[in-house]
Amino acid sequence: MKTRIRTLSLLLGSLGLASAPALAQEEPTLGLSVSTLNNPFFVTLVEGATIAANEGGAELLVLDAQDNPSTEAANLEDLIAQGVDAILINPTDADAVVPSVLAANDAGIPVFTVDRSSAAGAVVAHVASDNVAGGRLAGEFLCEQLGGTGEVVELEGIAGTSAARDRGAGFNAYLAEECPGVEVVARQPANFNRAEGLTVFENILTSTGPVDGVFAHNDEMVLGAIEATRAASDVSVEDIVFVGFDAVDDARAAVAEGSLAATVAQQPALIGALGVEAALAYLEGESVRESVPVDLQLVTE
């Protein structure tokens, strides 16, 4: 197998699971089921995974679930039938993916989750940012920008995903504990989608009137909300503090121009790379950590 750069946190942790029962093949095949390739965040995650697979001398099969749990189940069934050496999953739904994880367990194929987790089943390692901490970071920033008082909207991600659950939990916990003067006056899913973010926020503006701030569980939704605000006649982008999550390129550009106040930066390429490195290390008989955290930070102007 080609020499590859290994991440120290994967190889040295005392929290590792039992190592793989047998040595990996000369050129292992990994399967990666990603929730959607229509989102730039996951495109970047796949790019990082692909680079790590190439450096590790492995073949990486990437399948797009198109944000559909049924499609994801079919994709995972296909990977299991092919007998891949390990499966990496970015679940569309934490509960819906469980039967597929269990099927892989029964087939003796090690499972790794990236960015989003599975609600059950044996998972060797989960690689992700601390989404609860990221939600709290967004809440803290929004509170500070509003001076501790105001009305805000929360645009939620896909129901059932760990990312939506954890980001919302962190955000709302911070407001409840540290910033009770900021009230969430509307909370509605826009499914991590820019077009839905536009439509949902447009409807919220119509029903509630102008608000002081918006927190969206990802950048795609908040960028849609900004578009909706630009099209509105009774409010301007400058009147609302917008905060997103992921720090994709379009969001960074929006921060630079001033329409987006902040976005919580993950490192999707690193998440993908660390997922592949964990799988390859495990297949080589090494111990890997059950939870591999990836740092995040707030990006502001």
Image: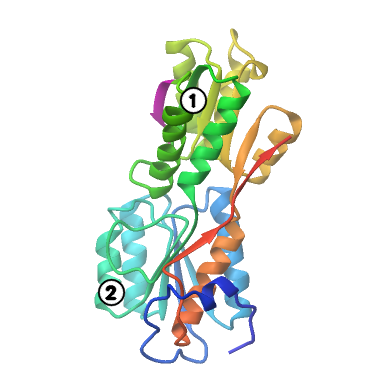
- Lower position in the chain sequence, tag 1 or tag 2: 2
Residue 205 within the segment the image draws in magenta: no
Asked if residue 266 lies left or right of residue 171, the reply is right
- Name the element at disc 2: helix
What is the total number of numbered labels drawn onto the structure image?
A: 2
Q: Position of residue 215 (x, y in %)?
A: 52, 30
- Where is residue 205 shown, x and y percent of the image? 49, 15
Q: Is residue 287 above or below residue 202?
A: below
Point out which mark residue 105 bears: 2
Residue 154 appears in view: yes
Q: Are marks 1 and 2 in contact (CB under 8 Å)?
A: no
Percent of width and height locating residue 153: 47, 23
* Colouring used for the render: rainbow
In what quadrant of the picture does the C terminus appear?
A: top right
Examine the rendered structure and indicate whether residue 226 appears above or below residue 166: above
Q: Amino acid at mark 1?
A: Cys
Residue ID at (43%, 58%): 90
